Amino acid sequence: MTTPADPSTGKGIERREFIRTTGAAAGALVAGFPAIIGAQSVTNVLKVGLVGCGGRGTGAAAQALTADPHVVLTQMGEIDLEILERSRTQLQSSQRFGDRVQVARPMVGLEAYEAVINSDVDVVLLATPPGFRPPHVTAAVAAGKHLFCEKPAGVDGPGVREVVAAQLAAKQKGLALVSGFCWRYNNMIVEAIKRVHDGAIGRLVAHYSTYYTTPVKPMPPESTRPPGMSDIEWQVRNWYNFTWLSGDSLVEQAIHNADKIMWVMKDVPPLSAVATGGRAVPANGGNIYDHFSVNYLFPNGYRAFLSNRQATGCYNATHDVVMGTSGTLILGQGNARIERTDGRVRWEFKGEEYDMYQREHDELFASIRRGRPKNDDLNLTTSTLLAIMGRQAAYTGQQVTWDQAYHSEVRLAPSPIRWDASHEVPPVAVPGRSKVI
């Protein structure tokens, strides 16, 4: 059985060889793995810990509790007690599973993730800002926990490599690791892309993908910053607006489109990318772009074009148009169809769509119960890296190769991260001047 491409080389290799070659990168995580799930019966309780209790984390916890009647939420971790308590109250108030929210002593602070992971939970849900993802994934795998890990895998090359090592260690340990690339759990998109892979539109020619939407978390004016609040706290509380925390809009949000591009290409990465981007609206602080347009070149000459924009009062659309020699796949607005070259519809999805967010957790917990934990292979990291190289190309104004993106030594986060610390972020990148590969 062949794996998706190795992110470091772009070459597909056999699964056994792939795991064998990770060597020391994963070996330290494997020693001492406790068998915690495999022998359990279907009625055994699975204890779940949540790290990151904002809207996405609260939703993930609700989906985990819905997926299996014997799941109990026993631990929660968050930087802010108010956010945590709001999440706990919301979950406890549900008539479906309120009595299964049994968090006696929640954990608060930047180190809260360690307390959650090192408690007696069986499954950890990671829903913090992406800049924290690599060390959290590493810690969870080292502790022998099954994982639901929100996208993306990280915000820079070193972070991606760390998650690759952790994910391979999870495979060796027999741990589940399901990512938040939710479209891969949407039956409409699954069926559509399978048809493309089976030749329904002929030889692939190009892919045009858009994610045009409104701003996610606009940066508040500096004048609203409370007196005495540190740089780190201010940035974490406004995490979406800082590249070291969010990865920028291309990596945090439009990464779903990046994932569909990789999926269509069977997770074989591109050779290179060139891109444009910038800020059309002043940032009021922060250092992210509000628009990108990336041109990816794949080994067979196939081109993929990914554009995203976050602005108010503008045309919004999330679409994918995959063009082939004998037809076109069109995804968007809750529809999937394949058109012939003359415009007539050859196929259109007519079924009922799954709730893809729920489906992720249904499959995660069912796989644990079966004793065959599901691991989302390397699309968690390859799709993340596709988005990162697009950002790097836009920030620098240069052509960026897959190898450059993967082996980059630029770490965006400060080290160590202290809640009371000062941290001056770089200004908004200027193409042609910025050196951020």
Image (spheres, helix red, strand yellow):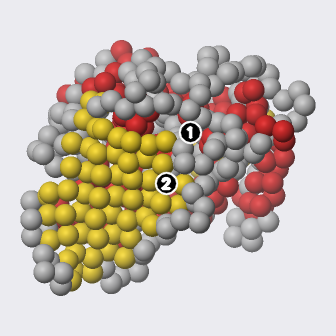
At horizontal 35% and vertical 52% (from top left) the residue drawn is 306
What is the crowding at mark 1: few (fewer than 14 residues within 10 Å), some, or many (at least 20)? many
For disc 2, the neighbor class at 10 Å (few under 14, some 14 to 19, many from 20) is: many
Q: Earlier in the sequence, mark 2 or mark 1?
A: 1
Spatial separation of the CA atoms under disc 2 and disc 1: 12 Å
Label 1 is placed on what type of residue?
Ile
Q: Which residue is at 76% across, 31% downward? A: 233
Label 1 sits on residue: 288
Element under label 2? strand
Residue, far right = 227
119 to the left or right of 253: right
Residue corresponding to mark 2 = 309
Quarter of the picture holding the N terminus: top left
Of residues 121 and 63, the one drawn nearer to the viewer in this rendering = 63
Kind of residue at disc 2: Arg
Q: Position of residue 246 (x, y in %)?
A: 56, 39
Quarter holding residue 348: bottom left
